[in-house]
Image (cartoon, grey):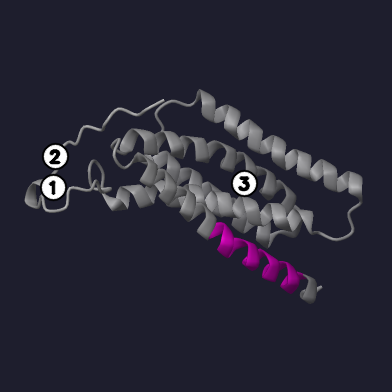
Amino acid sequence: MIEPPHERRPTQASRVSDSDDRPTLHTQASRLTYLALILPAAFVASGHTATAFLVQTVGGSNVAAMTWRVAAIVLAEGIGSAIAMGVRDVGLQAQVAIGLVGAVTLGIGLAVGPLLIASAMVLSLLDGLVLPLRSVAIQRLADDAVRARAASLASACDMALKTIALPLAGRWRGRRRFLR
């Protein structure tokens, strides 16, 4: 399947200077809008990854208990994705709100040890919900010429925050064990 050539719509930035006619993220929305759309979902995804890691590395669990924990986390993510299928036209405010709920959930899970498993499940549900919603929002917000670049930027932010979150989770786990 071959994509039809994109139709370039002139913007204020391209009218000022036509010397560089490569498409940029300024075609429909500002960079701040893209960041506000990308970062909350990336934060939820990294919080989900960190708490899932912590839940799976808690000592004193037998194989059956660990299997149930992992299955519950994956099921919660699937439920979040199923909810996302039924949601229509979620705006930027909803993305930010989901990010804030994720931050509060992560904070509670890390502060109150017995709630870590519940926190991991809620973050998993939010991860399953927010990532498809962000993808749809990027599809609607970005011009044809920059859609793939915007999606790649979102994926890069996800990976960067996960790369930061996992070592922090490992350090937090080691510190908690040290304090016992």
Going from N to C along the chain, the mark reached first, 2 or 3, is 2
Q: Who's the residue at 68% across and 71% down the image?
A: 171
Counting other residues with Cα less than 10 Å from the Cα at mark 2, is it few (<14), some (14-19), or many (20 or more)? few
Looking at the image, is 89 positioned above or below residue 160? above
Q: CA distance from mark 3 to mark 1?
A: 41 Å
Quarter of the figure with residue 147:
top left
Q: Are marks 1 and 2 in contact (CB under 8 Å)?
A: yes
Q: Which amino acid lies under the numbered mark 1 shown in the image of this protein? A: Ser
Given residues 130 and 109, the one toward you in this image is 130
Indicate the position of residue 175 as horizontal and vertical percent values. Answer: 72, 73
Q: Which residue is mark 3?
A: 123
Q: Which label's residue is closer to the chain start, 3 or 1? A: 1
Residue behind mark 1: 14
| Image spot of residue 131 (x, y percent) | 51, 40
Name the residue located 70 percent from the left edge and 67 percent from the top edge. Answer: 170
Query: Exactly how many numbered labels are in the figure?
Result: 3
